[in-house]
Amino acid sequence: MIRKTACSAVTLLVLIGATPAFATNGMNLEGYGPKSMAMGGTGSAYDTGNSAVMNNPATLGYMKEGTSEISFGIRGLHPDISIENGPNADKSDATAFYMPSMSYMRRDGKVTWGVAMLAQGGMGTD
């Protein structure tokens, strides 16, 4: 009974103390492509499709031999930026930044090749 109560108390404290995690700082995206973003930005050692060309092009070698992949996408960043520093306060008028991406990859035998255009970041800092 005491053990169950202690476990419940610890679980409650962890849940109360948890804060939301935001995995991007706006300038650098946490991931490229839907697979990488869904997995929290992984892509250095895991095949995330065509967008892997941004993190680790070697993972494109995992494509099936004789296959081609074409990809198009657009990512939207909608920040709400404001600053307050003593008597000074300001708010950004910019509310939307769109970053397009497109790529074509092909594996022929032991060679994988392709072309890609992906956005590196956002918020008008590029």
Image (tube, rainbow, N blue to C red):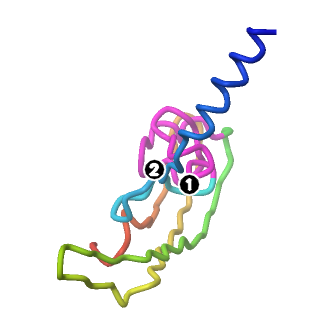
Q: Is residue 96 left or right of residue 33?
A: left
Q: Is residue 85 above or below residue 48?
A: below
Secondary structure at numbered mark 1: strand
Task: Tell me the tag on residue 105.
Answer: 1
| Tag 1–tag 2 contact (CB < 8 Å) | yes
Any magenta on residue 45?
yes
The three-letter amino acid code for the residue at tag 1 is Met
Q: Position of residue 79 (x, y in %)?
A: 44, 75
Q: Position of residue 50 (x, y in %)?
A: 56, 53
Q: Is residue 7 above or below residue 44?
A: above
Task: Tell me the tag on residue 53.
Answer: 2
Extent of the magenta region: 35-63
The quarter holding residue 73 reads: bottom right
Spatial CA span between label 1 and label 2 = 9 Å
Q: Position of residue 19 (x, y in %)?
A: 52, 47
User: What residue sits 43% from the left and 41% below the top?
Assistant: 56
User: What residue sits 56% from the left and 73% below the top?
Assistant: 74
Q: Residues within 10 Å of mark 2 (few under 14, many from 20)?
A: many
Nearer to us of marks 1 and 2 is: 2
Secondary structure at numbered mark 2: helix
The three-letter amino acid code for the residue at tag 2 is Val
User: What residue sits 46% from the left and 61% below the top?
Assistant: 115
